[in-house]
Amino acid sequence: MPHDTAPHARHVLESVLRSDRARILARVVRIVGDLQFAEDALQDACVEAAREWVHSGVPLNPQGWLVTVARRRAIDRFRSLLAASRREKLLFERALSWEVESDDAPVPDDRLRLIFTCCHPALAPEIQVALTLHVVGGLTTVEIASAFMVSDTTMGQRITRGKRKIREAHIAYRVPADEDLTKRLETVLATIYLIFTTGYLAPTGAAPVRVDLLDEALRLIDVLVLLLDDHAEVWGLAALMHLTDARRLSRLDATGLPIDLVHQDRSQWDADQITLGLSLLSRARSFDEPGPYQIQAAIAAVHARASDAEHTDWTMIATLYDGLLALHPSPVVAMNRAVAIGLSRGPREGLALLDEETLTKALIRHHRFHVARGHLLELSGDLEHARRAWEQALRLPMSAHERASLLEHLEHLESTTA
């Protein structure tokens, strides 16, 4: 083969893994029945592909080639464990007896099985997130550790514990039955949304926006839309994430500091992504099964439709928060509802809600509660108490980027009132 086939083969392999790794791995897991063995076997197949495709050329169906070779390598690994435990012998017998599908046979729900396995409720939430990003998303341990501000060793242990738990607890590699699907789906959606929000509001010390996590979360929810298109909240979460991500380019100023929604340049919002989000929301609403993600998406849609901050329909947003609070009562939702009421009916009415004893007690150590009070106090003309609220917020944990942005706002307030 010509010498220049090496870059071409490498490029094809990288492209296939970037676009189809989860699909390929899901098929291998289904065949061999063990997540760790499937990952190891796929890695072996990739090493072989990098060598073989240079000399023999890229196969017509590289995805199918990788599945076939990974199965063979898994069998090789199982053979080496014949003297080991009964569990491993059973896995080996299963791999040998499996009737292999043709390389191009469609298996549309394999990725779905993989996602539900990674998000099994028997696993701790932090392990669900780590496994989903690693196994389904293909992120390395180092990348995931960096995103969640823990050491590589800690993240590696989480992933290892998760795989061990799946094996030892005999967690089935399947989509749950109808009676359990809704409850399990809540865990899957919550995991994907946590990945998204971690990228959107990066933790202390990280970059203000983690584009890799945003893109991975969007890819995961788009997969779920394709595979579970008869569940309203799947469409609702997809709508919420796309409508929110449409603002990505406008969220930071030239120095990297966050820009609040009111002051963002809406000409930078992605019109095509907004159109997609609105379409997803319309599909979610067609089921007539309201849920928290749909309502949050509807709130994002109100912002997306407004020509500017001044023309935002805060009355509609307040009404939507009424519905969200009824479905998903929480102090944070109550706080956001109070702000919306303050912006629609007047800041004093919003402040009265924020200052209710129950809400104050629940959020007294939440910096965004004090930031919200400060903004409503500023709107009411009470700049002295607004300043005190923001100073209280600065005494609480927050990201370095939020802190810098709030300090800049305080400095601006000082200069305009001096």
Image (tube, grey):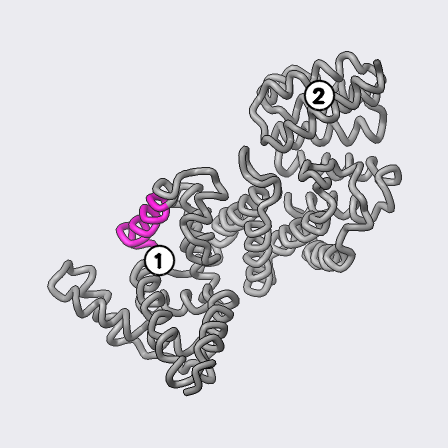
Badge 2 density bin: few <14, some 14–19, many ≥20, Cα 10 Å = many
Quarter of the figure with the C terminus: top right
- Indicate whether 216 appears above or below 359: below
Q: Label 1, on which residue?
A: 172
Q: Please say whether residue 159 is one of the residues in the magenta stretch.
A: yes
What segment is highlighted magenta in the picture? Answer: 156-171
Q: Please say whether residue 301 is one of the residues in the magenta stretch.
A: no
Residue 93 screen position, x and y as percent: 21, 71
Q: Depth check: give the residue in front, 74 or 4.
A: 4
> In which quadrant of the rendered view does residue 3 lie?
bottom left
- Indicate whether 55 appears above or below 193: below
The residue lying furthest to the left in this view is 83
Helix, strand or loop status at disc 2: helix
Helix, strand or loop status at disc 1: loop
The residue lying furthest to the bottom in this view is 1
The residue sitting at 34% across, 42% down in the picture is: 153
Determine the CA span between mark 2 and mark 1: 46 Å
Q: How many marks?
A: 2
Residue 302 screen position, x and y as percent: 79, 45
| Labelled disc at residue 354 | 2
Instruction: Please name the amino acid that badge 1 sits on.
Output: Ala
Contact between labelled residues 1 and 2, with CB atoms less than 8 Å apart: no
Answer with left or right where residue 265 lies relative to residue 403.
Answer: right
Residue 250 screen position, x and y as percent: 74, 45
First in residue order: circle 2 vs circle 1: 1
